[in-house]
Structures are given as structure tokens and as C-alpha cells.
Amino acid sequence: MSRAFVKEDVDPPERSGRKRSASGLPPGATNYITARGAKRLRVELNKLRAANASSEGIIELERILASAHIVDPPSAPSNSVTFGATVTVKDKEGATETFTIVGVDELNFERDAISWISPIGKALLAADMGDWIKLDDGRSAKIVKIEFSESDST
């Protein structure tokens, strides 16, 4: 095989000595999390400690919380989608879907949670009320509602 087709100088993080974050984000990526998600992780950590659970689970949650950058909801209503928002979209046939944009470590906490680094998450974060976005299945959908949970603050 020709050396022109070998990428020896480009190693994945695991082979290069650079470590992925506790959240599985690539090296250098910020671990954004909502205040509500951070609170839930702290509650889970306290439960593990109280139950004398395995130290691996405790250590992992401690690393996640130590690396987390908590994003507070906007202080005033906004027509722009931001991190932590619950966004409702409607397609051309009138079907609606709801997405809550959260951090990678809190995906299991919300029924309609999507990661801010997912394709839909990225599309929504670049949008405003009334904008059209592409959904995973190729449909276009219009943003019809942007809201924030009252329980976001800790």
C-alpha cells in the first residue's frame, strides 16, 4: 500500500494520548449542561454516595460535574433558540414535535431531549421563532414555540 493513503500523523484521541472528557466529548470541547441537569446529577451522586455504591460510578459523576459548564436560561423571553430551550416545530402537514436542547450528560432526564451537538440541536441553536429547519428524516419544520422550564434554576 502506498504511504500516500496512510494517515499515521492523525491519531484518534485514544491513541494520541489525549483523553476524551468524562462526558465523551472530544478533547477541548466544553461540557455544557443546564442548571436542572446539574442538579439532577448532584442528586444522583448523593444517592450513590449514601448507598456506598461502586467508586467507579461516583468518580465518573464527580468528573462530569467538575467538567460541566452550567448554562443559565435567559433572563427574559427570547425569539431565538438557546441552550436549554424546549422548542416545538410543525411540519408542512401540521405534525408537531418538541425538542429540549440539553448537554450530553442529561439526555436521559428529558423525554424529548436532544444534545446541543446533534444535527437537530445545532440547527435549532442557529434558529429563531418562525425559521424552518430540516429534521433527521428530511422533513422541513417551522419553529412555532420556544420556552424554558421554570425549574431550570438551582
Image (spheres, rainbow, N blue to C red):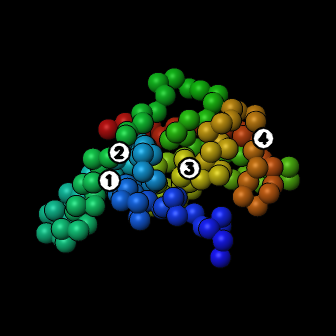
How many circles with numbers are drawn on the protein? 4
Residues tagged 2 and 3 counted as in contact (Cβ below 8 A): no
Look at mark 1 in the image and give the residue it sits on. 64
Residue 94 visible (yes or no):
no
Give how far apart the Cα atoms at labels 2 and 3 are: 15 Å
Q: 115 and 149: which one is in front?
A: 115
The residues tagged by marks 2 and 4 sit, at their Cα atoms, a distance apart of 31 Å
Q: Amino acid at mark 1?
A: Ile
Question: Are circles 1 and 2 on residues that touch, CB within 8 Å?
Answer: yes
Which quadrant holds the C terminus?
top left
Marks 3 & 4, CB-CB < 8 Å contact? no
Up the image or down, 64 lies above or below 82; here it is below
Q: Which mark is residue 117?
A: 3
Nearest to N terminus: mark 2 or mark 3: 2
In three-dimensional space, the C-alpha distance between marks 1 and 3, rounded to whole angstroms, equals: 17 Å
Please, what is the three-letter code of the amino acid marked with disc 3? Ile
Name the residue: 76% across, 36% down: 131
- In percent of width and height, residue 132 lies at 78, 41
Q: Which residue is mark 4?
A: 132
Q: Are dots 2 and 4 in contact, CB under 8 Å?
A: no
Q: Mark 2 belongs to which amino acid? A: Ala
Tell me which residue sits at (56%, 50%) in the image.
Answer: 117
